[in-house]
Image: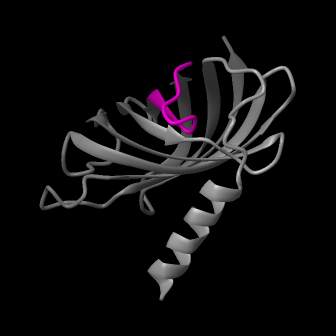
Amino acid sequence: MKHLTLFSLFISLVFFSNLEGSPIPAAHLTLGGGYNQAGCHHSGGVFQAEYLFYRRYFRLIRPQVAIVSPELRSLFIGGGLGVELYLSRHLIFIPSFFPGLYIRGSGKDLGCPLEFRSTLGFAYEWGWGFRLSFQYSHFSNGSISHKNPGLNTAILSLGFPL
């Protein structure tokens, strides 16, 4: 029943959202910071830089790349796809999924260099293309390694049209 409810919500968002996309189609560079949590001994600040490509597929799907530094000397570099669902003229729901490379540094051992980032985000876009967004992300290796502790981040960012 839970999966049916989530599926129904997703279908509703797809069919009742503005499928035309942004009033000003542009590539975006987003820069942000926030908080990461990976257990009681590994939490703190996080920095993210993300590039959203100009090109969209099916007017919704947009390629993206990101660099995330969840802890001092740790780094995630990845790329994938995001879906931009306009809930109103200015409010956007942006789920995304990225595979990527996690370089541990002195941060938490996530079990494998291959990690997957799944994100749920909301953005407010002004008429000239600038965005203020909030993202909640989960990093996981999908249990392809014997160790899979995961990492969660909450990020507030500003997006600039290019």
- Residue 17 screen position, x and y as percent: 70, 51
Residue lying at the far bottom in this picture: please name it.
1
| Left or right, 9 with reference to 61 | right
Q: Is residue 70 visible?
A: no
Report the quarter where the C terminus lies. top right
- Residue 143 screen position, x and y as percent: 20, 61
Q: Residue at x 27, y 50 (%)?
A: 110
- Residue 3 screen position, x and y as percent: 45, 79
| Left or right, 82 with reference to 126 | left
Span shown in magenta: 54-66
Q: Residue at x 54, y 30 (%)?
A: 48
**Closer-to-camera residue (4/74):** 4
**Closer-to-camera residue (136/8):** 8
**Closer-to-camera residue (47/79):** 79
| Left or right, 96 with reference to 124 | left
Give the quarter of the image for residue 73. top left
Whether the magenta-drawn stretch holds residue 28 is answered as no
